[in-house]
Image (tube, helix red, strand yellow):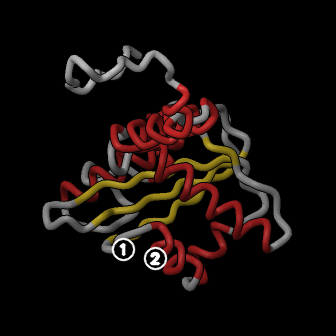
Amino acid sequence: MGDLPTPPRSSTEPRRTDRSHMADRRVPSRSLSMCALALLFAVVAACAPVGSPGDWQSEMIASVNAQRSAAGLGPVERCGALERAAQAHSEDQAAASTMTHTGSDGSSLRTRVDRSGYAGWRGLAENVAAGQSDITTVMGSWMNSPGHRANLLNGSYTHIGVGRAPGGTGALYWTQVFGLTGSC
């Protein structure tokens, strides 16, 4: 940083060459580092897309695994192939403004999973929902439904993919696809 500007002075006023009077204005370098770090995090957070897929998907999977852990079950792992199937189904439901396990092209869960590349699987399940505004609410709905709860808490499943898409009215369409031993 450069020198601070010298205030105007009269020709009879002595020039100050001693800067000891400024010691109380200095900010410790550690404080500056912490401020810079906080600013960096704020900028990164502000630049991240709101609702970016990684954020909500990780949160959803963590919620599923928390429910499984509370029931004494092991976690399911995120699977790209099942994620593609789940996301495509959510987008299809949103475009058709309908919540169903059958795709608008007549496809079944099995067909959609095969299309996504999840090969060698030995078991599949799907949860769908529409209208819930956030993960906590949709997970609450599924956990309060015996069939959906059974899918979430089936200890056989090893993989999960999740999807979410807004419909024309802004309602969210949610999908969870569970798989057993397929290739992700």
Q: Residue furthest right?
A: 72
Q: Nearer the viewer, residue 84 or 170?
A: 170
Q: Secondary structure at mark 2?
A: helix
- Residue type at mark 2 is Thr
Which quadrant is home to the C terminus? top right
Above or below residue 131? Residue 87 is above
Residue 127 vs residue 62: left or right? Answer: left
Which quadrant is home to the N terminus? top left
- Residue type at mark 1 is Gln
Instruction: Provide residue 69's location: percent of width, then percent of height.
Output: 79, 66
Q: Which residue is located at x 38 percent, y 38 percent?
A: 43
Rendered image: mark on residue 132: 1
Instruction: Provide residue 163's location: percent of width, then percent of height.
Output: 42, 52
How many marks overall? 2
Q: Secondary structure at mark 1?
A: loop
Which quadrant of the structure image shows residue 88? Answer: top left
Instruction: Provide residue 23's location: percent of width, then percent of height.
Output: 56, 33
